[in-house]
Amino acid sequence: MANIKLPKGATRKGKLRGRGPGSGRGKTSGKGHKGQNSRSGGGVRPGFEGGQMPLYRRIARRGFSNYPFKKSIAVVSLGDISTKFADGDVVTLEALKERRVVAKTEGYAKILCGGEITIKVVVDGVAVSKAAAEKIIAAGGEVRETDSSANTVAAE
């Protein structure tokens, strides 16, 4: 391990500052003339915005936000089902994920009435709008009730 070396040019020496006019970084050491940032210990604290009310003080920090518990529901149209599924298939959330109709990270999906459906499918465990359910049944399909109450959250 002692004889391993970095390739040439992999490391650079830091600029030497304040070592006289011949160094290229002498006299003011790259800090310019006068002013807050030229002084030792100069500069402003993190979050300081020049006297403007800083962001961390402008934003309210009280009350409750439901955002972390928000349920994202993927919207699926009947047209998507008629193109991705065959006659007699069972439409479940897993089947929708396999056929890439919804993202693999989605926890819930709801079938809405967009498009037409001509195939017979069985919808199981996926929330369905009333209009979409009517179209599926009219095409000869079946809509089974879902057990999960969280999956029936309205996305209309």
Image: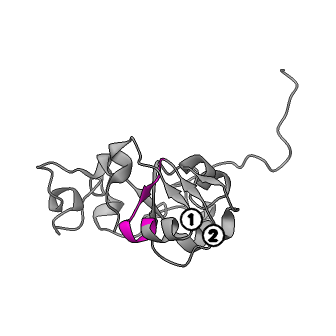
Q: Amino acid at mark 2?
A: Ser
Q: Which residue is mark 1?
A: 140
**Vertical placement of residue 78 versus 9, above or below:** below
Q: Which residue is mark 2?
A: 82
Q: Nearer the viewer, residue 78 or 104?
A: 78
What range is drawn magenta here? 125-133
Percent from the top left, x then y, of residue 25?
55, 62
Percent from the top left, x then y, of residue 134?
43, 69
**Vertical placement of residue 46 versus 38, above or below:** above
Residue 19, visible in the rendered structure: no
Q: Nearer the viewer, residue 103 or 128?
A: 128
Looking at the rendered image, the quarter that the N terminus falls into is top right
Percent from the top left, x then y, of residue 153?
32, 54
Q: Residue furthest bottom?
A: 115
Q: Residues within 10 Å of mark 2 (few under 14, many from 20)?
A: some
Disc 2 or disc 1, which is closer to the eye? 1
Residue 3 falls in image quadrant: top right
